[in-house]
Image (tube, rainbow, N blue to C red):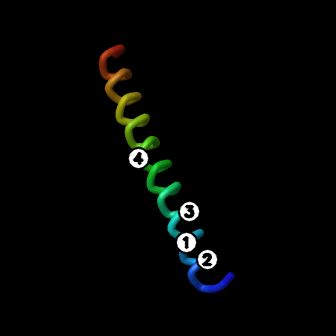
Amino acid sequence: MGQNAFVASARKLTLKQQTTNWFYINYTTLEGITNAAIY
């Protein structure tokens, strides 16, 4: 264990965060389009 392990885990967390943000943005966009279509 050392700095490399820390960096690797930090990268994984960052990637997970980016994926979460991407899904969240797509979901809210889709929701906005759906609401616009309904109303």
Residues at discs 4 and 1 in contact (Cβ within 8 Å): no
Pinpoint residue 30: horizontal percent, then vertical percent.
Answer: 37, 29
Mark 2 nearby-residue class (10 Å; few <14, some 14–19, many ≥20): few
Q: In the figure, 37 relative to 13: above or below?
A: above
Q: CA distance from mark 2 to mark 1?
A: 5 Å
Q: Which of 18 and 37 lies nearest the eye of the viewer?
A: 18
- Which tag is nearer the camera, tag 3 or tag 1? 1
Residue designated by label 2 = 5
Residue designated by label 3 = 13
Mark 4 nearby-residue class (10 Å; few <14, some 14–19, many ≥20): few
Q: In the figure, 30 relative to 26: above or below?
A: above
Q: CA distance from mark 4 to mark 1?
A: 21 Å
Pinpoint residue 39: horizontal percent, then vertical percent.
Answer: 34, 16
Q: CA distance from mark 2 to mark 4?
A: 26 Å
Amino acid under label 2? Ala
Q: CA distance from mark 4 to mark 3?
A: 14 Å
Position of residue 22 in the picture relative to residue 3 (left or right) = left
Mark positioned earlier in the residue sequence (3 or 1): 1
- Which tag is nearer the camera, tag 4 or tag 3? 3
- Residue 22, numbered circle: 4
- Which tag is nearer the camera, tag 4 or tag 1? 1
